[in-house]
Amino acid sequence: MIKDWLDKVQHQGPVDAEALKSTVIAKLKTIYDPEIPVNIYDLGLIYRLDVDASGVVEIDMTLTSPACPVAQTFPGSVENTVRGVEQVTAVHVELVWDPPWCQDVLSDEIKLELGLL
């Protein structure tokens, strides 16, 4: 697996990290929370997204609740989805609980969509 990653990085060369970050965000917006009909990016579950020039993506994400039924598997699903983005050479998703997620991170548009306004 490390050899495959090294081969991919060596053949790819440097990438435009900002453009790749935009592509990763677009991909994250295709992943929906299993209990709330909003994508994980707009739901505010992505706390940190770093992309470097070698195509390595690091994500800190949370869930709406530690009791979420997919807490054990969802970060891996996110990682696999982002790994499918062209020019991404490696992905690491860290599940974090601090700060706890709350509805305050939602835009007014999302709150309206969910009937919270």
Image (cartoon, grey):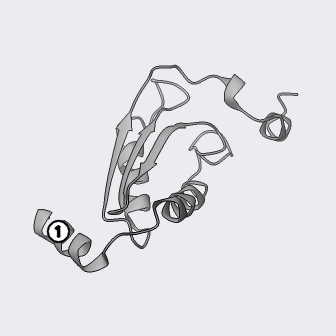
Residue found farthest to the top: 99
- State the image quarter where residue 86 is shown: bottom left
Where does the image place residue 56, in percent across and percent down from the top left? Answer: 33, 57
In terms of image quadrants, where is residue 4?
bottom left
Residue bearing the label numbered 1 = 6
Q: Amino acid at mark 1?
A: Leu
Q: Is residue 82 left or right of residue 9?
A: right
Image point (56%, 55%), residue name: 25
- Quarter of the picture holding the C terminus: top right
- Residue under the point 18% across and 75% down: 7
Q: Residue furthest left?
A: 3
* Residue 109 vertical placement versus 3 (above, below): above
Residue 1, how many percent across, how many down? 14, 64
Q: Residue 15: image x %, image y %?
A: 40, 69
Q: Residue 78 or 107: which is nearer the viewer?
A: 107
Q: Quadrant of residue 29?
A: bottom right
In screen coordinates, is 12 left or right of 25? Answer: left
- Left or right: 116 with respect to 63? right
Q: How many residues crowd around disc 1 within 10 Å: few (fewer than 14), some, or many (20 or more)?
A: few
